Amino acid sequence: QVQLVESGGGSVQVGGSLTLSCAVSSTEYRHTECMGWFRQAPGSARQAVATFYGYTTVWYTDSVKGRFTISRDNALVLSMNYLKPEDTAMYYCAADPASYGCFSDSPSEDRFRYWGQGVQVTVSS
């Protein structure tokens, strides 16, 4: 019913930029009303990076504010600038028809029903 496919990962040096894209295959927009990007570094839990709800409501975790931008058109896009080694992780696209995950100070992965396979982002110094 809903498929999410990420692209755009790769390796970059500190201070560089990458853009991740998540292609959304869904019969209706409402099935993916709330969307987000999560990341998981080795040995760490998966954490929310940014969320996008409806057409304009966005949220960012503190560590990426001013550096990352989330947007949505036909795909969910995460533009990442001034990358740091601590941004190294597997990045996942997620979606849910409900709004709960997008209206939280700390979005939980439990609030997202659909997930992509993930793309690796590696930032080297």
Image: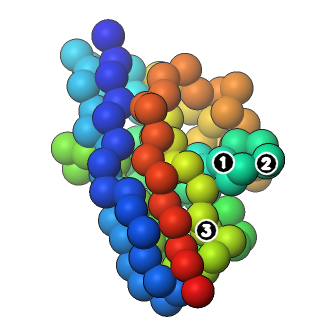
Q: Position of residue 118 (x, y in %)?
A: 46, 40
Kind of residue at badge 1: Gln
Towards the viewer: 117 or 71: 117
- Judged left or right of residue 43, residue 17 is left
Label 3 sits on a secondary structure element that is helix
What is the crowding at mark 2: few (fewer than 14 residues within 10 Å), some, or many (at least 20)?
Answer: few
Find disc 2 in the rendering and name its residue: 44
Label 1 sits on a secondary structure element that is strand
Q: Position of residue 32 (x, y in %)?
A: 40, 28
- Judged left or right of residue 26, residue 112 is right
Q: Position of residue 39 (x, y in %)?
A: 61, 50
Q: How many marks?
A: 3
Query: Where on the picture, by quarter, is residue 5?
Result: top left
Q: Position of residue 15 (x, y in %)?
A: 49, 89
Find disc 1 in the rendering and name its residue: 40
Contact check, label 1 and label 2, Cβ < 8 Å: yes
Is residue 33 visible in this depiction of the protein?
Answer: yes
Kind of residue at badge 3: Asp
Q: Residue 87 carries which label?
A: 3
Gap between marks 2 and 3 measured at Cα: 13 Å
Label 2 sits on a secondary structure element that is loop
Towards the viewer: 125 or 34: 125
Kind of residue at badge 2: Ser
The residue lying at 48 percent from left, 23 percent from top is 114
Q: Which mark is residue 69?
A: none
- Asked if 95 appears above or below 39 in the picture, the reply is above
Gap between marks 1 and 2 measured at Cα: 6 Å
The residue lying at 58 percent from left, 86 percent from top is 125
